[in-house]
Image: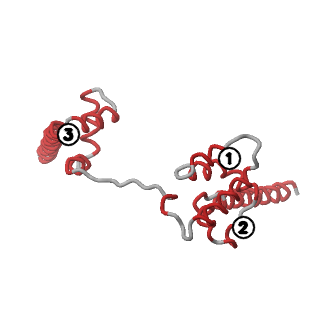
């Protein structure tokens, strides 16, 4: 009788944890900032966001709108203004001013790869780790060295990698010779 009661409680506890995990996952999905921004031009999607969700995203929305409207954003940042009302204001203001989704809302960075950067990324992680240990530096310092002296650093890393490969091949040859004897 006691075991049955324990097993029943255990199942309900597992079910509770599963429902709790599902609820948290649903909350994380519902608090998607870019979904809110995209919904500015779709009233049905915008209506799905609750006041509480808008309140949680007001800082991000206001910060993004400050890109083109810094004065208005500063006024709306004052304490005492309802967060969901600020989000509603930005929705109305943006949809009235722009007929389609404005491109400046998404800020993206162009990643231009340098030829030296491509060479740097081709090194094995073991080579980089050995270089860091030998020179007693951190990865941040290595990146700074690469920015300032890329050709010298690449040359050093090439030498080190060559040394490591010859050392490894020498060790493998010794092992083969010892095992054949």
In the rendered image, residue 45, in percent from the top left (x then y), is placed at 67, 70
* In front: label 1 or label 2: 1
Image position of 67 (left or right of 180): right
* In front: label 1 or label 3: 1
In the rendered image, residue 166, in percent from the top left (x then y), is placed at 12, 42
User: In what element is the residue under mark 3?
Assistant: helix
Looking at the image, which residue is at 63% across and 62% down? 36
Instruction: Using the image, tell me which numbered label, if any, was put on residue 76.
Output: 1
Q: Residue at label 2? A: 48
Q: Say above or below: 48 vs 131.
A: below
* In front: label 2 or label 3: 2
Confirm whether residue 44 shows in the render: yes
Q: Is disc 1 in contact with disc 2, using a CB cutoff of under 8 Å?
A: no
Q: Residue at label 3? A: 150
- For the N terminus, the image quarter is bottom right
Toward the viewer: 153 or 165?
153
User: In what element is the residue under mark 2?
Assistant: loop
Q: Earlier in the sequence, mark 1 or mark 2?
A: 2
Q: Earlier in the sequence, mark 1 or mark 3?
A: 1
In the rendered image, residue 147, in percent from the top left (x then y), is placed at 26, 38
Image position of 155 (left or right of 137): left
Q: Say above or below: 102 vs 70.
A: below
Confirm whether residue 167 shows in the render: no
Query: In 3D space, how far apart are the residues under numbered discs 1 and 2 (Cα atoms)?
Result: 23 Å
Q: Is disc 2 in contact with disc 3, using a CB cutoff of under 8 Å?
A: no
Query: In 3D space, how far apart are the residues under numbered discs 1 and 3 (Cα atoms)?
Result: 47 Å
């Amino acid at each position: 009788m006691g075991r049955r009661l324990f097993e029943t409680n255990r199942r309900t506890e597992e079910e509770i944890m599963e429902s709790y995990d599902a609820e948290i996952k649903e909350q994380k999905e519902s608090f998607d900032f870019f979904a809110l921004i995209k919904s500015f031009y779709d009233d049905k999607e915008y209506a799905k966001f609750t006041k509480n969700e808008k309140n949680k995203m007001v800082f991000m929305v206001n910060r993004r709108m400050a890109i083109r409207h810094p004065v208005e954003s500063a006024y709306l940042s004052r304490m005492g203004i309802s967060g969901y009302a600020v989000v509603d204001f930005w929705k109305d203001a943006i949809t009235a001013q722009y007929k389609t989704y404005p491109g400046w809302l998404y800020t993206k960075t162009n990643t231009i790869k340098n030829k030296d950067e491509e060479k740097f990324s081709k090194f094995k992680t073991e080579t980089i780790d050995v270089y860091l240990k030998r020179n007693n530096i951190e990865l941040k310092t290595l990146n700074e060295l690469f920015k300032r002296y890329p050709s010298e650093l690449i040359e050093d890393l090439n030498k080190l990698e060559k040394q490591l490969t010859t050392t490894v091949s020498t060790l493998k040859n010794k092992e083969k010779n010892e095992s054949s004897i």
